[in-house]
Amino acid sequence: MDISVVVPLYNEEESLPELFDWIARVMHANKFSYEVIFVNDGSTDKSWDVIVALAAKHPEAKGIRFRKNQGKSNGLNVGFKAATGDVVITMDADLQDSPEEIPELYSMIVNDGFDMVSGWKKKRYDPLSKTIPTKLFNAATRSISKIKLHDFNCGLKAYRLEVVQSIEIYGEMHRYIPFLAKNVGFNKIGEKVVQHQERKYGVTKFGLDRFVNGFLDLATLAVMSKFGKRPMHFFGMIGAILFFISLIALAVLGGLKLWGLKTGNNPGLLTENPLFFLLLTTLILAAQMFVTGFIAELTLRSSSRKSNYTLTETINLEQPEV
């Protein structure tokens, strides 16, 4: 199969028939073999009924349904596991991503040799309350990941099948798929300017809290990408720095105490100096950092991450492993 289109969605019943028809027209015009995997993320409207109806009429339409809302990352993760196409395309279900971009995205993967291609909505139809935080978020992600992309969070992306089979998306990490791909060795990451459509139906499902969560996830990923395989290097380094600073400072306090006694001055008890207790606390924190590093190393070697979402049913495909 040439292309798998993975569409995570939540309460998008109005747009789904139009989206599928648009994708189908593009695929037929370019003679692609394809499948469209709709991942219904616990929608409370009639989205699943629409997917069932589409699947009954079109064998290319396939569906996965979560028992409850699990977030976009889990939706993409399970969609990636179900995909079988040589190239995997992701897009949002709200018609703001244009299927007309698919042929060129496919060509960039197959003919130009990119591992993945990320869309860049250069001209956006969003309010300033969304575009300004987005620019700050993208600038921070570029700086930390060293990946020169303008729009990390664009839902329209293309991947070589091997890429999506090699990464695990959890939490809110769907924003950082290029970063995750780079961390497992896929370095040929491209970008394509794509058209941003105005929302036709419904309202956005994301609030401003996603930017706060996004920066927290970025900090987590930055640490994990560098120290994830050897957490002791991270915690141990912090512990060692705290330990030696505290040890040297305590030695200086002790030296001043001895100097005071030698010169006949009464320096008082060390325990009367507030700095003594501050340094003692720092030594305890250093020890805790070492212990945390050891525990993290043991945990890493004895366990693996398990997905915690539950699927209720699938259409036209086998239920993916979770």
Image (spheres, grey):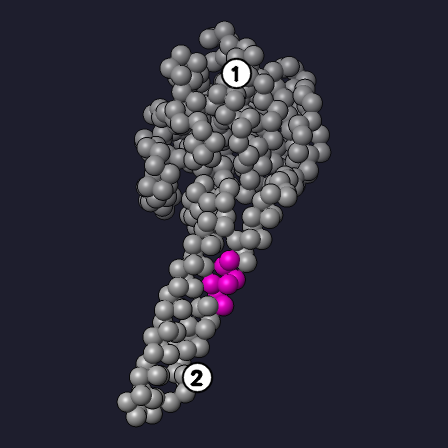
Residue located beneath label 2 in the image: 271
User: Tag 2's secondary structure?
Assistant: helix
Give the residues drawn in magenta, as a range. Answer: 284-290
Disc marking residue 86: 1
Instruction: Classify 10 Å Cα crowding around label 1: few (below 14), some (14-19), many (20 and above).
Output: some
List x then y, in percent, for residue 44: 63, 39
Q: Secondary structure at mark 1?
A: loop
For residue 94, side relative to residue 125 (left or right): right
Please name which of the two marks, 2 or 1, marks the residue nearer to the observer. Answer: 2
Q: Percent x, y for residue 55? A: 65, 19
Amino acid type assigned to the residue bearing label 2 in the image: Thr
The label on residue 302 is none
* Residue 127 in view: no
Quadrant assignment, res 7: top right
Prevalent SS, magenta region: helix
| Quadrant that contains the C terminus | top right
